[in-house]
Image: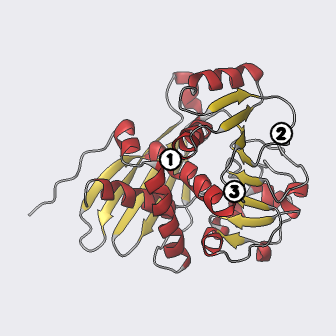
């Protein structure tokens, strides 16, 4: 007896299976499972490809399903008119190993990463946001705009970037979602209550004195040489991290700031209210396969598996 391999879902089909409200809930469950050892998610394996490309292998297992994300990042693809990232997330029944679904890898990554940020806002912000500052105009920024529009309709989003024309183009391309996108230059407006950094900058793009009424979220710096937040913002904040183990090797802003890892709290800690005071808060996201497993659970739940 053979088991039929499910066909791969397209990017659009994958997105439809991952609505942000349900995806946030699935990640909250996975964060608790991961912290309690019910999800096993080793550090990702990175293998070289030609022209500075890399192949990333990220497996995770739980009592219900196992997943394996394989993603290829090829920077030279831009010159060829091709996407920089290709890949898949395959989910399997934990008891039998039978394949259940194959999802588009970049779509899963974009949406689950944005959902982790939305979960951080839901958990760590003092109140639902009224005005958000977004640093970056790439794929992750687009996913975060979509997530903010889905969960916080009517929100104002100030978009900051290195290139003024690029920022204006981004706002035009992603307008019409029910939130206001505004190109911005200079410092973050005092009225902003959430700052989300989504860049690959090698120097901090934000290093203001932290405020209890402003949540800082760092997403883009995923290598030791990268940094989006400076030491002033980091050392003055309670720091929560989605994956503390992975962050020790990947969270460049924390590494460069000489962060004391014994003071950091996990996403699960935040969900349970552990380690919270009335002080300023910073959330650092580096990602892990447990969040891809949560996305697979969400997708499978949409068609009753």
135 displayed left or right of 121: right
Q: Which of 71 and 61 is in front in this view?
A: 61
Asked whether 147 or 260 is in front, the reply is 147
Of discs 2 and 3, which sits in the foreground?
Answer: 3
- In 3D space, how far apart are the residues under numbered discs 2 and 3 (Cα atoms)? 19 Å
What secondary structure is found at the residue carrying circle 3? loop
Tell me the element at label 2. Answer: loop
Q: Is residue 286 visible?
A: no
Comes first in the chain, label 1 or label 3: 1
Measured Cα–Cα span from mark 2 to mark 1: 25 Å
In the rendered view, tell whether residue 267 sits above or below residue 121.
below
Q: Do the CB atoms of the residues marked 2 and 3 lie less than 8 Å apart?
A: no
The C terminus is located in which quarter? bottom left
Residue 221's x, y, as percent?
A: 71, 49
**Furthest-left residue in this view:** 1
Count residues near mark 2 (Cα–Cα under 10 Å), then give few for <14, some for 14-19, many for 20+: some
Find the distance from the CA under tag 1 to the CA under tag 3: 23 Å
Return the residue at label 1: 111
Q: Mark 2 points at which residue?
A: 188
Q: Residue 123's spot in the image, x, y percent?
A: 63, 63
Looking at marks 2 and 1 on the same chain, the residue that comes earlier in the sequence is marked by 1
Q: Which of marks 1 and 3 is in front?
A: 3
Query: Among all residues in the image, which is located at the extreme bottom?
Result: 36
Residue 127 has which mark? 3
Query: From the viewer's perspective, is residue 132 above or below residue 68?
Result: above
Q: Quadrant of residue 186?
A: top right
Between residue 276 and residue 81, name the one nearer to us.
Answer: 276
Quadrant showing the N terminus: bottom left
Image coordinates for residue 255, horizontal then vertical, percent: 80, 61
| x then y, percent, for residue 183 | 73, 26
């Amino acid at each position: 007896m053979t088991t039929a391999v499910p066909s791969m879902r397209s990017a659009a089909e994958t997105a439809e299976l991952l609505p942000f409200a349900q995806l946030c809930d699935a990640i909250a469950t996975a964060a608790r499972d991961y912290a309690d050892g019910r999800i096993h998610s080793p550090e990702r394996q990175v293998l070289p490809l030609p022209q500075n490309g890399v192949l990333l292998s990220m497996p995770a297992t739980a009592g219900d399903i196992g997943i394996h994300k394989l993603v290829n990042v090829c920077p030279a693809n831009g010159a060829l008119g091709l996407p920089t990232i290709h890949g898949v997330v395959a989910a399997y029944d934990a008891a039998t190993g039978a394949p259940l679904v194959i999802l588009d890898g970049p779509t899963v990554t974009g949406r689950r990463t944005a959902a982790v940020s939305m979960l951080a806002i839901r958990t760590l912000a003092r109140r639902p946001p009224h005005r958000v500052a977004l640093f970056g105009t790439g794929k992750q920024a687009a996913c975060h705009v979509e997530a903010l529009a889905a969960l916080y309709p009517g929100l104002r989003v100030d978009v900051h970037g290195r290139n003024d024309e690029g920022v204006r183009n981004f706002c035009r391309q992603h307008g019409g979602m029910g939130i206001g996108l505004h190109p911005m230059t200079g410092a973050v407006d005092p009225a902003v209550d959430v700052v989300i950094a989504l860049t690959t900058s090698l120097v901090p793009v934000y290093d203001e004195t932290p405020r209890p009424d402003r949540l800082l979220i760092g997403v883009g710096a995923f290598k030791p040489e990268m940094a989006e937040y400076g030491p002033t913002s980091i050392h003055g904040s309670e720091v929560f991290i989605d994956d503390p183990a992975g962050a020790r090797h990947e969270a460049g802003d924390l590494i460069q700031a000489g962060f004391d890892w014994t003071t950091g709290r996990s996403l699960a800690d935040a969900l349970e209210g552990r380690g919270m005071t009335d002080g300023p808060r910073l959330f650092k996201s580096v990602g892990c396969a447990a969040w891809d497993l949560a996305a697979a659970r969400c997708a499978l739940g949409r068609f009753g598996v």
